[in-house]
Amino acid sequence: MSFLSRPSSLSHFLIAYPSLRWMPCQSWGFLRWPGLDGFMRLLVVFLLWSMLSEIRFIPSSSMYPTLRVGDRIIVEKASYYIRSPAINDIVTFFDPTQPSEDTEKNVFIKRIVAKAGDFVEVNNGLLYVNGIPQKEDFIAEPPKYTSNLARVPKGHVYVLGDNRNKSYDSHFWGSLPMKNIIGRFVTCCNRPSKR
């Protein structure tokens, strides 16, 4: 008889001792190698994850202080199949100034501040949507530029970076077509936790 097949006195003690009977390791079956079912489930989860989400890096300070240069973020791509983009969603999208046939498209990340039918204007350091000044405590500093009153057309949204004065966004090139949106920012996956 080998050492592994013969129960030891320690294992008899662990199984017989009343306060240790709740332990899941009484039967070491939970350490078994997963079968084909387990691998198929893992493969399905991996495929769904890769189709419905992606990890991106932040290359610029246009979304500071919300996102910093070098942050890794998780972007989910599924929710906009069942709902429209909402105000204050942070979205990734293809550069709307590039031709659609261009295969190497730039990807930006900005915050949606207005949707189709809204009137947008930046004046005196404030963003106005439909004539109402917006309270934005997440921006780096008030915008130092002004933009003329513009109406967001159907099928478009208006996006601005949180670092308003250092962001290449809708105040340069206008409203963003919703077909350019890749997905919605979910979370940072590398930022250290605050103590």
Image: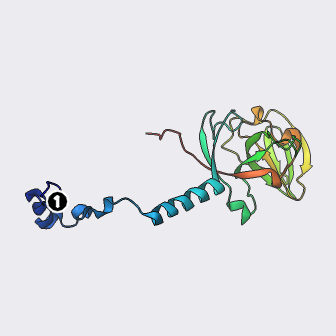
Residue closer to the observer: 50 or 71: 50
Residue 90 pos. (x, y %): 69, 49
Where the N terminus falls, by quadrant? Answer: bottom left
Q: How many marks?
A: 1
Residue 102 pos. (x, y %): 85, 41
Where the C terminus falls, by quadrant? Answer: top left
Amino acid marked by disc 1 = Ser
- In the rendered view, tell whether residue 14 sits above or below residue 161: below
Q: Residue at x 47, y 66 (%)?
A: 37
Residue 162 pos. (x, y %): 71, 40
Compared across the picture, whether 12 is left or right of 178 comes to left
- In the rendered view, tell whether residue 33 sits above or below residue 185: below
Q: Residue at x 73, y 58 (%)?
A: 86
- The kind of secondary structure element at disc 1 is loop
Q: Quadrant of residue 108?
A: top right
Q: Quadrant of residue 17?
A: bottom left
**What crowding class fits label 1: few (fewer than 14 Cα within 10 Å), some (14-19), or many (20 or more)?**
few
Compared across the picture, whether 85 is left or right of 150 comes to left
Residue closer to the observer: 60 or 98: 98
Q: Residue at x 61, y 59 (%)?
A: 48
Residue carrying label 1: 5
Q: Residue at x 68, y 61 (%)?
A: 79
Residue 2 pos. (x, y %): 14, 55
Compared across the picture, whether 136 is left or right of 95 comes to left
Which residue is the extreme one toward the front? 1
